[in-house]
Amino acid sequence: TYLRSAVESILQQTFGSFEILAIDDGSKDEGLDILKALSDSRIRILQNPRNMGIVATLNRGLDEARGELIARMDADDISLPRRLERQVEYLRK
């Protein structure tokens, strides 16, 4: 699975003031165990009561997010180390 690499790519960002909102949408693989094994206070795990689909899950994420800005990624995405830093810089300009 790519999930561990995806989350670790965010945890290693040069911009460190963020939360990871990981939403399990009824997965049947080991994804939830992988997330729980990554001990970092910036990770917040939510579980949907059933598979709700991408749109409902994204909307739930927007409702639950605590930050001013939101960066989205999927479980198989890898972010370069300066991704968040560069995006925040661009948006603040």
Image (cartoon, helix red, strand yellow):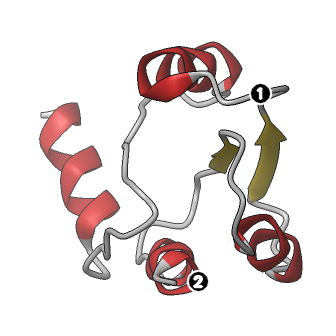
Instruction: Say which residue label 1 marks.
Output: 50
> In the displayed structure, does residue 70 sit left or right of residue 27?
left
Q: Amino acid at mark 1?
A: Arg
Q: Nearer the viewer, residue 84 or 7?
A: 7
Q: Nearer the viewer, residue 16 or 45?
A: 45
> In the displayed structure, does residue 63 sit left or right of residue 70?
right
Q: CA distance from mark 2 to mark 1?
A: 23 Å
Pointer 1 local density, CA inside 10 Å: few below 14, some 14–19, many at least 20:
few
Task: Choose mark 2 or mark 1, whichever is in front.
Answer: 1
| Depicted 72 relative to depicted 50: above or below | below
- The answer to which of marks 2 and 1 sits earlier in the sequence is 2
Q: Amino acid at mark 2?
A: Arg
Pointer 2 local density, CA inside 10 Å: few below 14, some 14–19, many at least 20:
some
Residue 23, picture quadrant: top right
At 30% from the left and 62% from the top, the residue drawn is 85
Secondary structure, mark 1, is loop
| Depicted 9 relative to depicted 36: above or below | below
Q: Nearer the viewer, residue 35 or 68?
A: 35
Instruction: Say which residue label 2 marks.
Output: 4
